[in-house]
Image (spheres, helix red, strand yellow):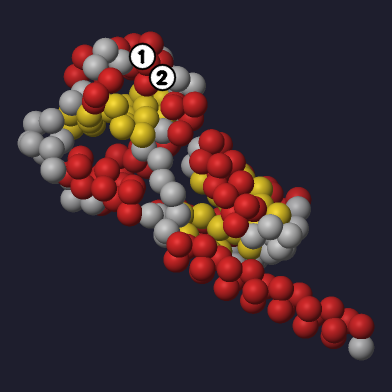
C-alpha cells in the first residue's frame, strides 16, 4: 500500500512518513510531502491513502478532492501538555515561535489560539525571513520559545541566551492514530483485491 503523509514542514512530513513505514513493515510504503504538494503528487503518482494530522485534515481533504481516503491521525498527549503549559502563562507573556516557514509558525500560533491561550503575545521567526533579526527579537522578548523539528535539527536552540525557555514543538501520534490508519489500510487492501478479482473474471 502506498501512503502519502502530508504536513506543513518537510521535517515533520519526512519524520512521520518514516514512523508510518516502521509501524507497517512489509505492508505499506510511506512518503512525506508538503500539503501544498498534494494535488501535484496525486496527479503524478499512485497513492492508496493520504494521511495527515487532525489539525490539517480539512485542508488535506479539500486538496485531495475525494480521489483517495484521507486519514486524520490523532496527536499524542505530550503535545497537549505543551499547549497547556503555554495556556497557563500569565497575561502579558510573550511566546517566540521558530519554524522553517512563516506558514508553520502561523499554524502553531493558530493551534495556541484554538487551545484557548489568551493574553499572550506571539513573536515569530522563520528560516525564510530575516532570520538574524527575528531570532534576536525573540531572544530579547520571549518568556517561552517554541522550536519546530527543523529548527531543532539546525541547532537553533543554541542561539538563545537562556536555554531554560526553549521547548520543542514536536508531536508523536497517539496509538489510536495508528489504529485508524491500520483499519484504512485493511479496507484499501480489501478493495484492491476485490477489484483484481473482478478484472480477472
Q: Position of residue 183 (x, y in %)?
A: 57, 73
Q: Is residue 73 above or below residue 93?
A: below
| Contact check, label 2 and label 1, Cβ < 8 Å | yes
For image coordinates 21% across by 47% down, the residue present is 84
Mark 2 packing: few (<14 Cα in 10 Å), some, or many (20+)? Answer: some
**Relative depth, front residue between 146 and 99:** 146
Image-based side of 190 in relation to 100, left or right: right
**Element on which disc 1 rests:** helix
Residue positioned most to the right: 200
Q: How many marks?
A: 2
Give x and y (percent) for residue 75: 40, 55
Q: Does residue 89 appear left or right of residue 165 in this picture?
A: left
Asked whether the viewer can see residue 35, the reply is: no
> Can residue 188 be seen in this snapshot?
yes
- Image quadrant in which you'd find residue 170: top left
- 31 vs 123, nearest the viewer: 31
Residue at the disc numbered 2: 156
Q: From the image, which quarter does the N terminus lie in?
A: bottom right
Q: Is residue 20 toward the left or the right of residue 28 in the image?
A: left
Residue that badge 1 annotates: 159
Measured in 3D between alpha carbons, the distance from the residue under mark 2 to the one under mark 1, in whole angstroms, is 5 Å
**Vertical order, 201 against 38 (above or below):** below
Identify the residue at horizontal 13%, vertical 38% (top origin).
Answer: 89
The crowd level at tag 1 (other Cα within 10 Å; few <14, some 14-19, many 20+) is few
Q: Secondary structure at mark 2?
A: helix
- Which of the two residues, 199 or 144, is positioned nearer the viewer here? 144
- Check the picture and name the quadrant holding the C terminus: bottom right
Q: Position of residue 78 (x, y in %)?
A: 33, 49
The image shows residue 61 at horizontal and vertical percentages of 52, 61
**In the visual, does 27 lie left or right of 131?**
right
Amino acid at each position: 500500500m502506498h501512503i502519502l503523509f502530508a504536513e506543513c514542514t518537510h521535517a515533520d512530513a519526512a519524520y512521520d512518513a518514516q514512523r508510518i513505514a516502521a509501524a507497517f513493515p512489509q505492508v505499506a510504503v510511506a512518503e512525506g510531502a508538503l500539503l501544498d504538494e498534494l494535488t501535484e503528487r496525486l496527479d503524478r503518482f499512485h497513492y492508496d491513502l493520504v494521511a495527515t494530522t487532525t489539525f490539517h485534515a480539512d485542508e488535506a481533504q479539500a486538496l485531495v478532492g475525494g480521489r483517495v481516503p484521507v486519514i486524520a491521525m490523532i496527536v499524542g498527549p505530550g503535545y497537549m501538555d505543551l499547549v497547556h503549559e503555554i495556556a497557563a502563562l500569565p497575561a502579558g507573556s510573550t511566546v517566540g515561535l521558530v519554524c522553517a516557514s512563516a506558514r508553520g509558525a502561523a499554524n502553531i500560533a493558530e493551534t495556541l489560539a484554538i487551545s484557548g491561550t489568551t493574553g499572550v503575545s506571539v513573536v515569530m521567526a522563520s528560516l525564510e525571513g530575516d532570520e538574524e533579526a527575528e531570532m534576536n527579537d525573540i531572544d530579547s522578548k520571549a518568556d517561552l520559545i517554541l522550536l519546530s523539528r527543523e529548527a531543532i535539527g539546525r541547532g537553533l536552540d543554541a542561539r538563545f541566551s537562556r536555554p531554560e525557555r526553549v521547548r520543542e514543538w514536536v508531536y508523536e501520534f497517539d496509538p489510536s492514530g495508528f489504529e485508524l490508519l491500520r483499519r484504512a489500510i485493511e479496507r484499501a487492501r480489501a478493495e484492491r483485491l476485490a477489484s483484481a478479482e473482478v478484472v480477472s473474471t
